[in-house]
Image (tube, grey):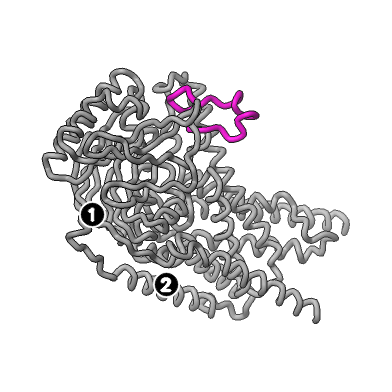
Amino acid sequence: MNAKVKSKKEKGKGDHSFLTFAFYLLLSLISGVLMGLTVAPVGAWFLAWIALAPLWVIVVQKSNSYLEAKKPKPWLLPLTFYLLPLLWGVGYHSVALFWITGIHPMDWLGVPWWPSLAITVFCWGFISLWGGLFVTIWGAVMAHLNQSKPWLRVLIGTALWCGLESLWSSGSLWWSSLAYTQSPHNLVILHLGQLSGPNTVTAAIAAINGLIAEAYLSSAFSAPRRFVNKYLTSATALFITLHLIGFYLYSQPIAQPPEAALKIGIIQGNIPNKIKVKPEGYRRAITGYTNGYVTLAAQGVNAVLTPEGALPIFERNFGDTPLISAVQKTGVVIWVGAFGEKGRSYTNSLFTVNSKGETTSRYDKSKLVPLGEFIPFEEILGKLISRLSPLDEHQVHGAANQIFDTPFGRAIVGICYESAFPEIFRRQAAAGGQFILSSSNDAHYSAAMPFQHHAQDIMRAIETDKWSARATNTGYSAFVNPHGRTLWISGYNIYETHAETIYRRQTQTLYVRWGDWLTPLLLGVGVVGWFVGKTKRGST
């Protein structure tokens, strides 16, 4: 009789444990989805300050429960544990990057409907899992810090997140930093990026989420239970203090000396990808960009900026176009998005064409879209993955140390996907770049993508303290000042031209001069704190 009762109790306990773990999985996924809702098209940026806290709590609680089980090898966590941070990461990145599904159907590349769907699902799933791997590593390390003091957990958890973002952004596949959840809505906190780049904002979000989580954890084991404690008080104080620092930077006046003024016109050609590389698309491009150039030149602009790949031709063929003839006639500089040659391969480039119609400088896109513009491990995957690029030739990366001189001084250039990589802009700003030229296509995806892209460019303008002109094929083209304020933004999927005055600036922020100094500092202090704590525990 007692054996039967015991068996029923153990079974009930197992059912309860399964239900509890299922609840944790669901909570991890939901909190990751909430973080994904912070960006376009929803833009619920305020959720970023609480959406990581549930995962933080779950990771600490579950790792504590495994430690209390006194397993022979407590550092070997069960595989089910890793599902918790993985689901959070998949939830975040799959929602934030859902716009990538807009590439389907790829009939403009001649890909049939079902293969197009398969490629789209593969791309979306791959980038979601890649982001999930990032969070899984973070969760695994945090699980082994369960004996650390809460303050040390917050420090190391924040430093680790920033370190992993730096590692991920040094590769080819990167977009959704925690920092960009605040753009374009919370310009005040984005000004922390002037101190040590986007990881400053990421650190702020991670630390406040960590303090909220530790507030819950400490209250869960206290009697009587009190949620308002030193950790929640610290989170509130830190949130206010960081926003006050950001507001101070945001409130600094922007000098606009007349001698630094530069009137730039942009042309949004609105050439659908379905026809972009066909004769019809070429005719529309030549007509649209030539007419737009003439219109802007008549408005007295100093230069005209065109989108990425505005002319789907090689630079050697510029002289055969009426656009260059118009440049020679009016004498207004133009920056042309077209293709450059690099051996037997080609580059996606931006060219300066001076008042005489001569090409005087060239910038080659250095960060190419994985699977879209190049195939990682092509020797292995090349036969398995169909290229998404509209051209048959191999596109290659531009050099990492390029500069872009213009008749108006040195510029900072970002072509499309490069907007997600702040180091590209920081390096050019440190080399003397005085204003930003962003040239993109953005026609492949849903409307959420170009708005997120604009949010990325806003961050780069703030971090470098530079004015930015952004020209896209289908939207959103825009002009942004050094405080991240959008002076003008285009419509979507329409042809537009617009002129705006920006100003060349030679200022250099702390981030431009020193780079991301905060992340190694946090990691260093965190490691020292961990060793000190471990030594103290070992001596007791």
Residue 404 percent across, percent down from the top left: 37, 46
Instruction: Report if residue 375 lies within the magenta region.
Output: yes
Residue situated furthest left in the rendering: 298
Residue 533 percent across, percent down from the top left: 71, 76
| Residue 502's disc number | 1
Q: Nearer the viewer, residue 321 or 296?
A: 321
Q: Nearer the viewer, residue 294 or 418?
A: 294
Q: Nearer the viewer, residue 328 or 460?
A: 328
Q: Is residue 266 left or right of residue 242?
A: left
Residue for point 29% across, 55% down: 467
Residue 237 percent across, percent down from the top left: 45, 77
Identify residue for label 2: 242
| Residue 309's disc number | none
Where is 372 relative to 485, above or below? Answer: above
Instruction: Report if residue 476 lies within the magenta region.
Output: no
Name the chief secondary structure element in magenta. loop
Callout 1 amino acid: Ile
Q: Quadrant of residue 349?
A: top left
